Image (cartoon, rainbow, N blue to C red):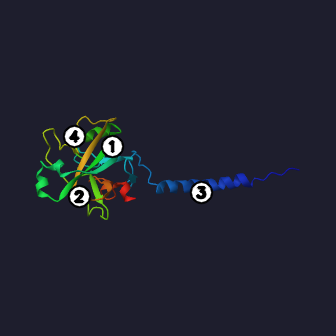
Amino acid sequence: MEHRSTAGPRRCALLAPVLLLLAALLLAGCGSASADGSVPPGTVLDLGESAVVAAPDPSAASTTTPVLVELAVTGVRERPRTDIAALEIAAQEPDLVPYFVTVDLAGVDPSSARLAGTPLLGDVHALARGGEPSRDYLANVDVEPGPDGGFWPCDSTVPEDFDEGSTVQVCVFFLAPSGTEITEVHYMAAGTDYADRPVVWKLDTAR
């Protein structure tokens, strides 16, 4: 007489809930995107990698209404002082040189259009090697708009026609001594969860 064991199927049935629980715990620990598709605070990326963030709505009195936009820090360059020779800050800081951080933006849904015409200046910060976040960020420079509406060749203002499907590049301007090694760029918009736990782009020099 042939006998068939039922231990295998029964064991699988008992293990299934355990495996599902382990999978849920692993996903929770991986920092998966939130319900609106934005990355969680504390996300760490390489230079050039993009992330959808929930930015504050500049048109609202409250910052609780999120604006979704895709960001990628794509470059950090030390520039000559001649780039800022026409600015008052050049005379005020004779020992510092400009650093330009370029950021690519992409509109991901209709809410992205609400960023049009607003600067990223206060949302993006640069950190040099050995610095401590929130304490040792490089000087983030705010300059008066030039004749074309911005400081050329580094303008942090999102263009007026920015909308869902748009892709643009903006630039954030910092001052530091020549030879400063910038190792991280942080997105930490005020009024968002990123203010305390920023999205961090690690530069190759930080490896």
Picture coordinates of residue 73, whole percent (x, y) = 33, 48
Badge 4 or badge 3: first in the primary sequence: 3
Count neighbours of disc 2 (C-alpha within 10 A) and say few if under 14, some if 14 to 19, many if 20 or more: some
Distance of label 4 from label 1 (alpha carbons) = 14 Å
Q: From where the camera sits, is residue 65 visible?
A: no
Q: Nearer the viewer, mark 2 or mark 1?
A: 2
The image shows residue 1 at horizontal and vertical percentages of 89, 50
State the SS at label 3: helix
Residue 100 falls left or right of residue 206: left
Q: Which circle marks residue 117 in the picture? A: 4
- Image x and y of residue 41, in percent: 37, 55
User: Which is more N-terminal, label 3 or label 1?
Assistant: 3
Numbered circle sitting on residue 178? 2
Whether tag 4 and tag 1 are in contact, CB under 8 A, the answer is no
The mark lying in front, picked from 3 and 2, is: 2
Image vertical order of residue 144 relative to residue 182, above or below: above
> What distance separates the C-alpha of mark 4 from that of mark 3?
51 Å
Residue type indicated by callout 2: Ser
Which disc, if any, is residue 18?
Answer: 3
Q: Residue at x 23, y 58 (%)?
A: 178
* Circle nearer the viewer, 4 or 3: 4
Q: Is residue 57 above or below residue 15?
A: above
Which residue is label 1 attached to? 69
How far apart marks 3 and 2 lie (CA) works out to 56 Å
Q: Nearer the viewer, mark 4 or mark 2?
A: 2
- Which amino acid, mark 1? Val
Amino acid, disc 3: Val
Q: Separation of disc 1 and disc 3 at Cα? A: 37 Å
**Labelled disc at residue 159:** none
Dot 2: element:
loop
Q: Nearer the viewer, residue 152 or 9?
A: 152
